[in-house]
Image: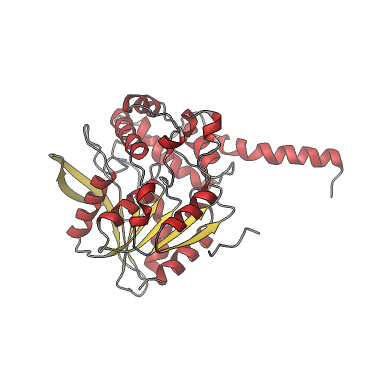
Amino acid sequence: MPSVRRAPSFPPLFRSLISTVALVAPLLAPLAGHAADDGPAYGAELEGFDYPAPVKRFSFTSQDEPMQMAYLDVAPTGAANGRTAVLLHGKNFCAATWQETIRQLTDVGYRVIAPDQIGFCKSTKPQRYQYTFQQLARNTHALLTSLGIGQATIIGHSTGGMLAMRYALMYPRETQQLVLVNPIGLEDWKAKGVPALSVDQWYQRELGTTADRIRKYEQATYYFGQWKPEYEPWVQMLAGMYRGPGRQIVAWNSALLYDMIYTQPVVYELGLIKTPTLLLIGDRDTTAIGKDAAPPEVQATLGRYPELAKATVKALPNATLVEFPELGHAPQMQDPKAFHQALIEGMRRVK
């Protein structure tokens, strides 16, 4: 299995002091200059936050409710190769967070479609909706059909990886290639002992969302203690919706989505995915839904991505694994150069 390359005298008292500073500084740095919840306020559909390309809207009816799915449709800037890439964001991400990937793919000739799923970011947040990965896949398929796209490479990150796998299971002929970037759902958290939380419990948790809480979670879980200034806009993007007048409907939809993620594992169906699949894994990832609610002995068994990646590529009938040993949950943000080189090379192998 291919693997991306690994990232490449004082007296004893000074060495000890330097080691202490080195350990503590990364934890303190992102908090400098930030109050617990300091930053802009955005609308419930992320009004006020700019995207890297013009936002379009797909209007449709789902579950007897009018919906609008926001999306980006970016034409190739390099010589067009006739292919389309669809980018599916994760739970704490939006279409906008794909901005560098959009630039890289359009540079080499891809048309790129990047939707905000219903319940997320700039798309409709319904008061009542039965969230399933099947429903989100149908919504995405309806969007692509409306754009005249019959076949595409489906690229999913995190929760978007769970959705991408469901899409490939439901629409195998329309899925030219599947690319999974640190997808969650490669293990069944409930079966491993993570206790179930009710939608009401998730809602109360989500009402407490602040920039500081998002930042600390992402630093510890996504970036294994590291932080870079370029991660901060995405923290503010999410936190801004919880500061705005629509915080209740944002929190409610987030609670429904967490329930969907927890209750609908895809791991048992991996062997049914025949689509050529590229699995891109940052090995330092420790993401697992509800992990903090589990007892310590269960927590220790969760989110072990080097093991999950190897089990997943073995279960998928037609898969290639590329590991990033020193990267975490969002390799496309931590090391864009290495990530996009592996992504584009892997996509070129499928004609």
Question: Residue 171: which quarter of the image?
Answer: bottom left
Considering depth in this image, is 69 or 305 the residue closer to the camera? 305
Could you say which is closer to the camera, residue 296 or residue 242?
296
- Residue 265 location in percent, x, y? 36, 43
Q: Can you name the residue that lies furthest to the left here? A: 64
Q: Is residue 40 visible?
A: no
Q: How many marks?
A: 0
Task: Name the foreground residue: 17 vs 149.
Answer: 149
Please give left or right for residue 108 compared with residue 309 in the image: left
Name the spot of residue 256 as percent of width and height, x first: 30, 34
Question: Which residue is located at x 37 percent, y 72 percent?
Answer: 78
Residue located at (48% from left, 53% from top): 311
Residue at position x 25%, y 64% in the image: 173
User: Percent position (x, y) of residue 290?
Assistant: 44, 33
Q: Residue pushed farthest right?
A: 11
Say which quadrant the C terminus sits in.
bottom left
* 147 lies above or below 63: below
Residue 4 visible in the displayed image: yes
- How are the colours assigned in the image? secondary structure
Q: Percent position (x, y) of residue 243? A: 37, 30
User: Residue at the spot x=29%, y=72% of the render?
Assistant: 82
Q: Is residue 54 above or below residue 1?
A: above
Residue 44 relative to residue 147: left or right: right
